[in-house]
Each structure stands twice: as structure tokens, then as C-alpha cells.
Image (cartoon, helix red, strand yellow):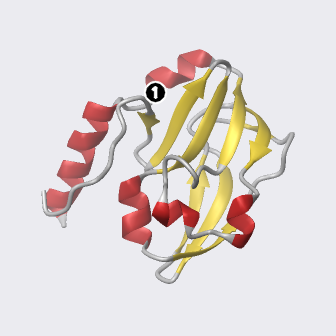
Amino acid sequence: MSESYDIPDDLYYTKDHEWVRIERKRGVVGITDYAQKKLREIIYVELPNVNTKVKQKETIATIESVKATSDIYSPISGKIVEVNIRLADNPELINESPYEDGWIAKIELSDEKELDNLMDPDEYRRYIESLEEEE
């Protein structure tokens, strides 16, 4: 692997490089270290609206970087109960701290079984390794 990526062990991951941390009945959602490094310098985040109901794999946010614009997909279904308003003025928080300060939204989980559709940290590591081999 050419570059090392931070992949915390307490999260679930998607093939689109979103992560979710489950805290009681809520999921905190963001993009992975891998994603933010691929996007490079993030300059704008379009946040979802609070109280919006979302389905798993539905677009919840858009991130613009100097390189590209990317949709962010919800790893879980539920209702958005909070968004990280700090990203409006400081989108670079996603680059600096993708798993802590750079979270995007908190979603009230509507179906815990959906977590079975996500990757655990080891699966995600192997997935990234396979992507790197293709490059």
C-alpha cells in the first residue's frame, strides 16, 4: 500500500468511503481519511437539512474540493437530527479531522439491520488495498 490511511476500529464503512459511528440510536456520519485525501483540499460542504428523512445510500450532502465535487451518501436510513454547522465556515475540518471535528451529520437510526450492509474496519482496509492495486 503506497499510503497509509487512518481507519478507526469503532466505525462502519461504505464502498463510497463514508463512515458511521453508532452512539445509542444515532449514527454520526462523515467521510473517511481515504476519501478526504483523494479529494484533497475541501473548499465547500453543502449540508443536509435537519429533520430530513433519508434512506440508506441516498445523497445527504455534497462536498466540493479543488479537484472535484462529490456526493456524500447516507450509510444508514433515518432522520437527520443534527448537522455540523462548523463546516459551513471551516470545510477544511474534514481534511484535518475526518473522524472527529469533520463529521457531517447525525442521523437517528431507523433500522439497525442496515448495519449488516456496511463493512467493518478490516473489510474496508482490504477494499482500499484492492482499489490501490487497480491504480
Give the residue displayed 65% in from the left and 45% down from the top: 58
* Res 64 seen here: yes
Q: Tell me the quarter of the picture where residue 46 sits.
A: bottom right
**Left or right of residue 52, residue 106 in this image:** left
Q: Position of residue 115 (x, y in %)?
A: 50, 23
Residue 31 in percent (x, y) is at 50, 52
Quarter of the image that includes the C terminus: bottom left
Left or right: 43 in relation to 60: left
Q: Quadrant of residue 110?
A: top right
Above/below status of 23 relative to 62: above
What residue did someone put label 1 on?
A: 117
> Residue 7, image x and y in percent?
33, 43
Q: Secondary structure at mark 1?
A: helix
Residue 78 placed where, x, y %? 73, 30
**Is residue 46 in sight in this rendering?**
no
* x 26%, y 50%: residue: 128
Residue 99 drawn above or below residue 89:
above
Q: Residue at x 59, y 74 (%)?
A: 64
Q: Amino acid at mark 1?
A: Asn
Residue at the image point whose x is 32% and y is 33% from the top? 121
**Left/right of residue 49 with respect to residue 134 in the rendered view:** right
Classify residue 80 as left or right of residue 96: right
Would you call the spot at circle 1 few (<14 residues within 10 Å), some (14-19), or many (20 or more)?
few
Q: Point out the image quarter for the N terminus.
A: bottom left
Which residue reaches farthest bottom?
66
Q: 79 above or below 45?
A: above
The mark total stands at 1
Quadrant of the rendered structure where residue 39 is?
bottom left
